[in-house]
Image (cartoon, helix red, strand yellow):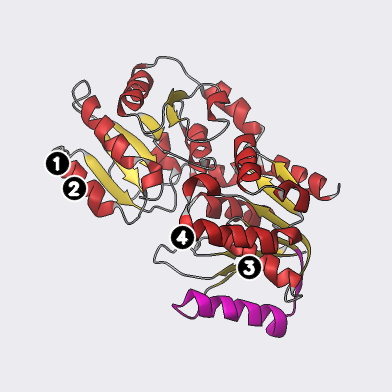
């Protein structure tokens, strides 16, 4: 079996983690992961042997797209059993190439990574609409992470459910990968008492809300520290906010880490503070390691998850109360979390994908 996964970059966010799970799961297949742009994260360096990583040769995304087209049509000329994408940009490229017979596959499975019509406006939203119109007819299965995301997509692009097979499949979780990584040592000394969040440092993640909330929590929990894992262009702005609140010794920006699980396991509370998400994969990762998990209702389905502490998005007071409730909670949600996560196992996910492809 031959599988192609096309990614805009080799950085590791939620969509990339999903595609990494797909690649790792297909152990008996030959999996090619083709990057159109590269970063300094080296987040794919521990990939399994059956996965081939193809990095770009140019700093220009346009030239890298041309190289991908040339390789697919003239150099490799491969026929794939599956192509997987999880970004409108890469889904659009693959769909257009399939329409022009520049690429060949039996099954094209795409996934919506965010609520495009809520998150973007203007020229960028128009470019995405063009991709929907030109390319999505070639998608054999288009996955939405939640029913809310599906409804928003249909409202934003009327008729998309008539041109492609649009289904809701909740995000998977890779238990074998978690078991492999959760007990790995951390090459740093962690605080005795800390709360933690992880993700790209962008406005949608709500780290300004989290830092402001943490300043309020310090009044009742003076020994508490906040660790934020991830990189992004807001780093200077967030550090300025930390300095303004006199929290330089208490908020730790640890950057991108390949293995988040030991950090989550040892935290007092794990937190998703996002303003908006498709669905935060990191929430499932946190639940796999820790019984005290806080999340804003930043995506559909979060309010239905048993055992987590909920907060309103973009609301400092609501987030503060939720974190405080988690810090003082005496109940153990381990059994509840495990039962919920079992339903999202990657095997169940792929079984559902293949079922929808066969209908």
Quick one: 224 or 304, which is closer to the camera? 304
Mark 4 element type: loop
Q: Which of marks 4 and 2 precedes in the sequence?
A: 4
Q: Which of marks 3 and 4 precedes in the sequence?
A: 4
- Return the residue found at the far bottom: 74
Q: Quadrant of the N terminus?
A: bottom right
Mark 3 element type: helix
Instruction: Name the mark on residue 240.
Output: 2
Image quadrant of residue 144? top right
Q: Which residues are magenta?
A: 57-81
Spatial CA distance of label 1 from label 4 is 30 Å
- Above or below: residue 87 compared with residue 168: below
Asked whether the residues under the numbered discs 2 and 3 touch, taking CB atoms below 8 Å apart as contact, a structural biologist would say no
Q: Which of marks 4 and 1 precedes in the sequence?
A: 4
Instruction: Name the mark on residue 93.
Output: 3
Spatial CA distance of label 1 from label 3 is 44 Å
Pointer 1 residue: 244
Spatial CA distance of label 2 from label 1 is 6 Å
In the figure, is residue 89 to the left or right of 208? right
Pointer 4 residue: 11
Which residue is at a point 34% across and 22% down the rendered structure image?
Answer: 327
Q: Nearer the viewer, mark 4 or mark 3?
A: 3
């Amino acid at each position: 079996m031959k599988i192609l996964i096309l990614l805009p970059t080799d950085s590791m966010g939620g969509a990339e983690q999903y595609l990494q799970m797909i690649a790792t799961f297909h152990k008996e297949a030959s999996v090619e992961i083709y990057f159109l742009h590269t970063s300094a994260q080296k987040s794919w360096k521990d990939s399994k042997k059956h996965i081939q990583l193809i990095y770009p040769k140019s700093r220009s995304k346009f030239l890298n797209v041309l190289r991908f087209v040339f390789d697919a049509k003239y150099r490799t000329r491969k026929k794939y059993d599956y192509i997987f994408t999880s970004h409108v940009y890469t889904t659009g490229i693959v769909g257009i190439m399939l329409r022009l017979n520049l690429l060949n596959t039996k099954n094209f499975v795409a996934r919506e990574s965010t609520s495009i019509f809520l998150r973007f406006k203007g020229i960028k939203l128009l470019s995405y609409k063009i991709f929907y119109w030109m390319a999505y007819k070639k998608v054999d299965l288009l996955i939405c992470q939640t029913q809310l995301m599906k409804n928003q997509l249909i409202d934003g692009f009327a008729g998309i459910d008539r041109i492609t097979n649009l289904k809701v499949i909740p995000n998977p979780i890779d238990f074998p990968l978690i078991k492999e990584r959760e007990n790995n040592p951390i090459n740093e000394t962690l605080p005795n008492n800390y709360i933690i969040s992880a993700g790209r440092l962008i406005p949608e993640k709500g780290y300004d809300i989290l830092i402001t909330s943490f300043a309020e929590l310090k009044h009742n929990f003076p020994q508490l520290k906040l660790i934020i894992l991830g990189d992004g262009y807001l780093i200077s702005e967030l550090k300025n906010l930390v300095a303004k609140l006199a929290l330089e010794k208490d908020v730790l920006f640890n950057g991108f880490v390949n293995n988040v699980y030991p950090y989550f396991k040892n935290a007092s509370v794990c937190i998703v503070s996002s303003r908006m998400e498709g669905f935060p994969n990191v929430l499932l990762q946190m639940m796999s390691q820790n019984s005290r998990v806080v999340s804003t209702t930043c995506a559909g389905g979060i309010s239905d998850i048993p055992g987590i502490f909920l907060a309103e998005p973009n609301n400092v007071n609501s987030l503060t109360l939720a974190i405080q409730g988690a810090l003082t909670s005496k109940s153990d949600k381990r059994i509840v979390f495990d039962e919920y996560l079992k339903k999202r196992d990657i095997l169940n996910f792929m079984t559902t994908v293949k079922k929808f492809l066969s209908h």
